[in-house]
């Protein structure tokens, strides 16, 4: 694929170009997002947009193809908020299984999932567990960017909270860093849940959130922190991707 | 939503904006594409890109929200060509069922599917048949743009074939009209299948296609015809959408 | 199987007779019907009976075995009318997949579906799409008889409508041609839907039909037109079957 | 339905006739068969034909509607013999669940399954167990005719074996009683399995049968015994059906 | 495994010990129970405890490994009684299929199911029917202990009823024989159903039972009869197991 | 339930006792284990035994009922080691969904899962996500004991590794604390994987482990550390359980 500036989106290749790519690498990056409420200030596309942005930048730096972004995840808990579209976990499992099985037939063997939404992780891991039994020679990472220790350290330093929440200052900052027009800053707010345990959807309003924000003071968000977080996430993902590819230097750039 | 120039993408709204939209309209447009081989000259994103382009333009003209584009469809028959990613029909059914069920919970009742890939139609219709039993008060169209009589007439006039095929002159023309750089014109080719009946994937090479083109001389494609086809598709879809909305004039623009 | 007059029903063969048949042909005809309301004048068996009648006559003329008729299809939309029995599309998919997979294990490779009910087609095609990935060397047609251009031409000439509807003059005529006692002619009626888009079942009464007839004036039906339509359907199907068998002359008669 | 001679087949009623029937009775008989090898002398339709014959005769005598016969059951173990078509138990479960759920929506509450094939019983019972949780006020019997004590007594007296087997003297006798031309008497044979435990299909040839007959000397079959068995089965089923209907006299004849 | 006193529980072996066992035997015993109401005097663990007790004793006498006991079965009909936990039949099918498939991968080929709950049998048999198509060289018995003729004879002699019911004198006697403290004898009771046909759960109270006991006078139960029944069940199962292992003498004790 | 010494196992209650319990508490503890290889020194029951032990002790201290232990989990990755029995994630999801749905019908609303095996967590969480949409008013925790910070601290202090692995010094120590005879100390060993990413099962031998131990030096295990870890886990779980019950003091002891 030559240079970093080249398009790494698999979707924009012809089948012959993908065939050529497979001659020297069998790795693919898969961005998985969600279409769910992110409070009064951020669009429902937030998680999808973050996953795609990170995946493409990591792909560019390492010269690795990025598959089509999955725009919907497990957002069942948020269905009380209009605009949310949710896959049941069993649907998301079928989705990722068919996705990976298709690429496996063509020769892909290393799958690197950039996950933009926490509740996706259980069904994604469940799906890969089944794939690990059904397919041969596959290697994979499914990783949430907010789980990188360095990333959490920034969250802690900047927002005083390494864990974040939902539609939190971290999300808003990342969006601002990508495109400030995505966030309506005047509507940033703060809300914290009453309990820590998990609940059924009919209890969300009473126990979790009325605004859609859960466990964060969004008003701490800033474009500058967002830029720092983005770069950290990209570097951590890149490191992990190289580990999956078992090379220490970018293969193609 | 005010004016035609406003963003009609549901994904870029906040949940409160979707809530407001539902106060005066319960219609949503759903673009469904595919990630599959389109011969040596067109990218695998072709069907997705066409569905999304048409959906957004129709949505803009009628002031109707457009849900997130589904980028993968039933492309099982093309899995021999690298880069193709296919949902089994049962997976695509779960996908569209969860998608529509989510929106139904929020109050959407009219669903308008802009389908960019022929083999998606059976699972889409199958899913809506089940939804029609499970949900109340839903109304829907699932329509392929190449089935509009006026559209077929142009195909016939321009390419001498009202039926087209796969990765055909029609697809290439539409891509050129949207962005000429998407098509590598020097690789446009022509190939016709040996049989008309349907086959299992292991027979594709022998009976259908080696290049990926099926039943068309792509070299007839042109940007001009593409523009004509695009406009026809948009107008036909708009007409159908108004029928679904039971209004004769655009509601919002 | 010797002569045209011989029984072509697979169900009435012993396993050894089927084994012998497979020595010279691997084709089977599969009739798929429905058990659904057909208005006040026609029995719920209508679609099943038509599919079976056509399949057997085509099988006899071409010397091809006809598998057991599937008597139930996707009639979910009609469940408000007593006597209707419906398979969800996912059930019908499992049904046809198990049916074809069984015969494939024995050596059948060419499957010719005579479909008697429009809403069956999406699940049938969806099932065959999955089968095309799971089984090897299969070839198939899934065809509705009312889609043959010559057949539609008769509909147009006789009833002024090439498209027909549900429980229409076409259905009633075909039944009369097979056995006039199947139709209570005094109850033939006419009803047209208020809309063209598809709806959920709870809206059927208001938007589609109260009598069960949809989009047709059944009173135009006649035994004579029925006979003409039957013969046309049989000839068109026979032609298509020979194409699937890749022979131009009947193999066995 | 007036008299015994009237047609009791639900499939041959219009939806209005079924509606009227529901005004005074909510019972339906469901015949379930199989399409599977029955040795060198009997057709694969055997079980279906027996179930349908018994169901119709019982329905006639008691004035109860008989739903469409399900022509395929769980015959997985016989798939090594050409002509056998098998539903996996999970498919058969979906089939019977959709069937009963459809009729339940129309008002049917009492379901009487006349089962013609032993291996159908587990999936049929499994399906009804789930239906018993999903639907309200249903009552049902799922019964194999060879399990009636009086019926077994005849088997014992005539063939010296109360248990029978597969494609046994009982089956052949019943067929002869219905229509002697269904059985090729010159090919009747005898074969007994080497073991009693159940096995996977790849072991059938070695441990169970080469001819298709399992555990019986078919040559003992006769039309006379068949007639006796038929009448016994009809009377036992009728008795059971009345128990389900909680009446002691036929309701309608 | 040397001697009868050795632990035959597979769960308490290391993987290397299981590997060694497979060198000389490929048989495993699988106890399947239920967690369901057993009237006012017996615990919900009753069926599980009986299945496990029998399986372990049979395993000890024959030197055959016993897999982990499945503690939940199809108890849907009893869900009106608190403490009951039920698997739908389709879930139980997946459970036993995964269980057996896992052991098959390691080399097990002979599966002996000791079933402690009647309603488990249909889903267990359905699952094994599918396994018989999917796996190679498997042999199996799925047997309810109350179906052994000798066992039924004792029931008849002692309680005047060879068929028993649910939470019956047989169950209570067996529990007493294992551990008298498991049964609250002062609460033993008697209740008989009003009908013989099967029903949906909402009708259980009215037609079957209010106490949880169905079709038995529990008060006839005794520890002495329990001991007799236990020994009979163990001997019958042992005999059947040897048949499955195709040896006439215990292999290992 | 009176006192701490009373049996808290739901399975050993009668349905009337469970009914009484529901009058003052709607909480249940659910232990989930696994039946999988734990290296040459520990039995395959390890995870099940730990989950059950912890659940019962926590239940006793808080006076909360403990449901039947699920003895099998997602151990697909270990299927290369004999004795391992694995549920596919989709099976485990059905299992926990049916389990919780049953108890929900009886009135249970708070579910506390003590999970003994890491790979169970994704399917458990996926199942509860779906349950949260299907059931009302449920609250739940699904927690792995090795994730409690205090617990990890001990691991770090004692074994120099807060993360542990599979069949590690932590597992062995816990077993020793419960019953030293469960561990064959002479076979304790040490093995570390070559990579960190996840793989398909066919790669386990080469990249993960030959002994079954993954990422730990088991030889550091001791009964004393085990006792410390057990008590810590019990206390942490008890704290969490009280949070779920929204009381600060044990309700019943």
Image: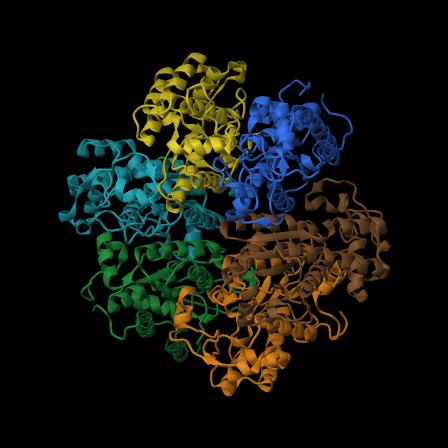
Chain colours: A cyan, B green, C orange, D brown, E blue, F yellow
Give the percent coordinates (x, y) of residue C71: 60, 65
Q: Residue furthest top?
A: F224
In this view, the residue in front, B38 or D128, is D128
Vertical arrangement, residue B224 with respect to residue D171, above or below: below
Give the percent coordinates (x, y) of residue A26: 43, 45
| Residue F124 seen from this side | yes
| Identity of the residue drawn at 77% across and 40% down | D195
Q: Is residue C93 left or right of residue A10?
A: right
Q: Quarter holding the N terminus of chain E? A: top right
| Identity of the residue drawn at 73% across and 72% down | C252
How many marks on residues?
Answer: 0
Vertical arrangement, residue A26 with respect to residue B195, above or below: above
In this view, the residue in front, B221 or C214, is C214
Vertical arrangement, residue E41 with respect to residue C211, above or below: above
| Identity of the residue drawn at 24% across and 71% down | B250
Give the percent coordinates (x, y) of residue C30: 62, 66
Give the percent coordinates (x, y) of residue D115: 67, 55
| Residue C129 seen from this side | no
Q: Residue furthest left?
A: A186
Q: Is residue B218 left or right of residue D127?
A: left
| Identity of the residue drawn at 62% across and 58% down | C99
Q: Is residue E242 left or right of residue B245?
A: right
In this view, the residue in front, B16 or F37, is B16
Q: Quarter holding the C terminus of chain E? A: top right
Q: Is residue B201 left or right of residue B87?
A: right
Which quarter of the figure has residue B164?
Answer: bottom left
Vertical arrangement, residue F68 with respect to residue A188, above or below: above
């Amino acid at each position: 694929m030559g240079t970093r500036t080249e398009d790494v989106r698999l979707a924009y290749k012809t089948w012959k170009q993908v065939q050529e790519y497979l001659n020297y690498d069998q790795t693919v990056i898969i961005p998985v997002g969600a279409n769910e409420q992110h409070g009064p200030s951020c669009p429902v596309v937030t998680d999808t947009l973050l996953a795609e942005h990170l995946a493409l930048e990591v792909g560019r730096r390492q010269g690795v193809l990025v598959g089509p972004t999955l725009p919907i995840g497990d957002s069942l808990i948020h269905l009380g908020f209009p605009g949310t579209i949710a896959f049941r976990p069993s649907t998301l499992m079928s989705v990722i299984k068919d996705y990976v099985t298709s690429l496996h037939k063509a020769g892909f063997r290393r799958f690197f999932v950039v996950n933009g939404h926490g509740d996706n992780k259980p069904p994604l891991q469940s799906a890969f567990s089944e794939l690990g039994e059904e397919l041969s020679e596959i290697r994979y990472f499914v990783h949430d960017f907010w789980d990188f220790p360095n990333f959490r350290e920034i969250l802690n330093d900047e927002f005083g909270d390494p864990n974040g929440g939902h539609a939190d200052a971290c999300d808003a900052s990342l969006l601002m860093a990508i495109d400030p027009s995505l966030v309506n800053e005047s509507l940033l707010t703060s809300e914290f849940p009453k309990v820590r345990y998990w609940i059924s959807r009919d209890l969300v309003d009473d126990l979790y959130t009325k605004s859609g924000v859960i466990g964060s003071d969004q008003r701490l968000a800033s474009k500058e922190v967002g830029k720092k977080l983005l770069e950290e996430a990209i570097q951590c993902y890149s490191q992990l991707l190289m580990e999956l590819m078992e090379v220490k230097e970018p293969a193609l750039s």
